[in-house]
Image (cartoon, grey):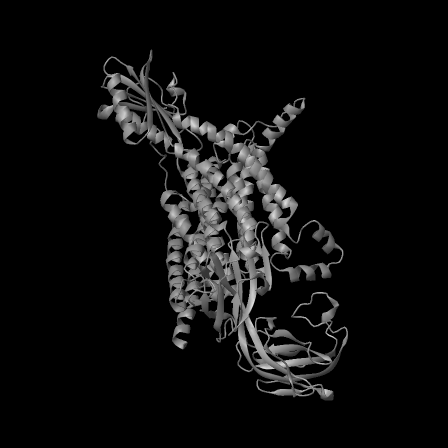
Amino acid sequence: MSDLASDLSTQPAAPPPLGTKGFFRWAWRQLTSMRTALILLVFLAIASIPGSILPQQGIDPVRVNEWIANNPTSGPILKRFGFFDVYASPWFAAIYLLLFISLIGCILPRSFMHARALRAKPPVAPRNLTRLSSSTEVSSELGSDAVIDRAERVFRAKRWRVRRGQDEGGPWIAAEKGYWRETGNLVFHIALIVLLIGVGYGSLWGWKGNVIVVSGKGFSDTLTQYDVWGGGRMVSPSDLPPFSFTLNEFTAEFERGEAQRGAPRFFEGKLTVRDTPGAVPYDTTIGVNEPLSVDGVKVFLVGHGYAPHIIVRDTTGAVVFDDTVPFLPQDGSFTSTGVVKVPDATPQIGIQGLFLPTAALDEILGPYSTFPAPDDPGLFMSAWVGDLGLNTGATQSVYRLDTAQMTLTGREALRPGETWTLPDGMGSVEFVDFTRWASFQIAHDPGQGIALIAVTFAIVGLLLSLFVKRRRMWVRARPAETGSTVVAAGLARGDDERLESLVNDVATAAASDSAQNGRRK
Amino acid sequence: MTETMGLAELSLLVVYIAMAIITMAMVAFAVSYAGSRAKKLVVRDRVPALVGSAGDSEPPAVSAVEPVTELPKGRRASNVGMSLTWLAFAVLLVAVVMRGIWAGRVPWGNMYEFSLTSALGVLAVFLIFSFFRDVRWLGIYVTTVVLLTLGLAVKVLYTEAAQLVPALKSYWLIIHVSAAVICGGAFTIAAGVTLAYLLQERRLRRTPEGQEPPVSRLPSAQRLELLNYKILTFAFPLWTFAVVSGAIWAESAWGRYWGWDPKETWAFITWVIYAAFLHARTTAGWRGRRAAWISLVGFLAFLINYFGVNLFVQGLHSYKGF
């Protein structure tokens, strides 16, 4: 809709005419006017702002809940009006959908007009060319037809579209160039619509899931294996491609220098992948910026952490729990929390743990980690006995212990290899060692290709619409006593600083090198 | 390590030298304004351009002739300012290159380096621009902005870190960030032009009907308006590309091409506002002052995106840069 749009946009609001049909006509004109598009663009910008200030459901649901808890009055109100999920809220959708309807209403008629213009001949030369703002008059020794011949050659050499004619003022030639401007303009705006379609298609037919895989363990692409999985309306979990992989090893390195100490520097996961259950497995690596592509699905490395290996024995010394448990990092130094639930012990045992890769103890704040790498690992635990509450039917997080029906029996800090004998002969907990886990985002977005093609076209279209100049030029040659008088004039859409000199160049070239008495208007 | 640390410190020292030169350039540009005030009358001497009359064989050769006056003092000072700006650019370029060599990568891995490169970008856009037009009147604005950016960089954002977080280790760092830096330079210059336009436009509005507006060192409102538009027609597609390349990079680093991260959101807002400017310019009643204000709001959104998001908002782009 760039600078040609002023021709098409409707005039300032006239009162709506009577009658339903008239009203809709009026409403449609209002909606598709440039002014409305402009206001909708401004609204779109303003409406996007809250999503960057308030925490968003889709990005950080934990912070959303915190925010609402901290602001009991404004929180629920904002939540009700979708301020914690701005980009999926009805009012945000209303703005961009109106904008796109306005856009379609604008480009449809323009596409037809442009299609006609592409086939049309340049317009007849106006009678008095000197009235145009860019015009020049020179005299030539050549005859009038020869001048027009020369002008035609000049125009054709520069690929102008030309049309010749003759009237009482003598022969004339009309030339037009720069149709790509409007083509690019339309391509840009159509590409934006295609982009929206691509994004919509991707969200309806796409899916993504997150999973934590402990080093040494595997993952196969079925719904039950995911920690979190979300798909568009058109996706069925049975559509998941049946690949699988094993995380053999995960490496993480951190900054040890003074500046930015502890900042991540290098992550890499070594995987063994099977495309289908029966396929030959192959080894590969995965890293940040190096996702893995399997069967139309992309696997991204998005996080990592530690998983202590814990063995719990009951009163008789029998092993009731033996596993590596992923602990979730709470800060940049990987102070990590995790929970062990032992439903098979009687009474049931629950352990809240704090894993510290580089352990330190603060008098007030308690244990914490000082560096993300495992330089001096320690595991701080609180053991609870009683009822884990697993039989109530309510779903429980594996990372949270419901201590409502449990009693605290003791606290202990262990180093790898150490065992803690629980008080009152309740059994023992052994911190064998620890390993790392990596979290993966596995996603399929079928709209991505459409979106990429759309933005490519959008950029090309944009460049054409901004840099190609649409120009019309006319040259008239009037027979004079000797030779002829040549008048050239030009018209451009939008600002065109070069038009004036182009008109002069054409006039001079058409009048040949015998041009004299050049005068500028 | 001490040897390589030396290069980083040397780079910082050179940044300080560049800042000193920029300050001198700023003073020179300021003097040029003071000088031009005193020389008002010289400009007034201009012979009124005659409209060519028809028929005579020897047209008065008027339009080609400029009024011959001695070089006003302001002009000399602004030339000194330009030379100093060139020097500052060269010195800052050396500092940035040294920082890059020290870090062993492109010199925009954290906010400090990004600010240095952005300042260099603003200077580059300004100096390239000076080949095509007389933009000395803009010198005072450019030097002020560059000095503020560099001051913020060395005082608040300075870091000795050389290495990158894994998400930044990608060739997209070169493509995406350099596009953003050039856009930053262009947006900054455009905002200066817009400010000048608004000044000129106000001057025109306050001139009583029938009177000539007071003489100014700034170009005419009309020219400034066109200039702003031209810069933004260059910057807008580039900004589009910067956003798109960021999306492609985000896809490989974070697993999605668009996630409404605060940086992405403000890049989008900036894009939408500049798009609104391009539309406003062709809408009756919006061209001129209103469109100019929209482009200034666009620059504000860009600044929020550049500083605000990195310094105050929690998001994926706040990568411990300082």
Judge by depth and name the residue closer to the eye, A42 or A420.
Answer: A420
Q: Which quarter of the rendering shows the C terminus of chain A?
A: top left
Residue A377 visible to the viewer: yes
Q: In this view, does A519 lie to the left or right of B31?
A: left
Residue A19 x, y percent position in the rendering? 67, 22
- How many marks overall? 0
Q: Position of residue B222 (x, y in %)?
A: 47, 35
In this view, A336 is above or below A153: below
Taking B22 as reference, is B198 left or right? Answer: right
Residue A402, compared with residue A222, is above or below; it is: below
| Name of the residue lying farthest toward the top | A168
Res A369 visible: no
Looking at the image, which is closer to me, B271 or B117? B271
Q: Quadrant of residue A505?
A: top left
Front-most of B50 and A507?
A507
Q: Which of B276 and A405 is in front in this view?
A: A405
Who's the residue at 57% across and 86% down the image?
A417
Residue under the image location 70 percent in, 49 percent down: A81
Task: Where is residue B192? Give x, y as percent.
Answer: 49, 46
**Vertical relation: B6 (above or below) B249:** below
Q: Where's residue B169, x and y in %?
A: 44, 64
Q: In which quarter of the image is residue B62?
A: top left
Q: Residue furthest front?
A: A278
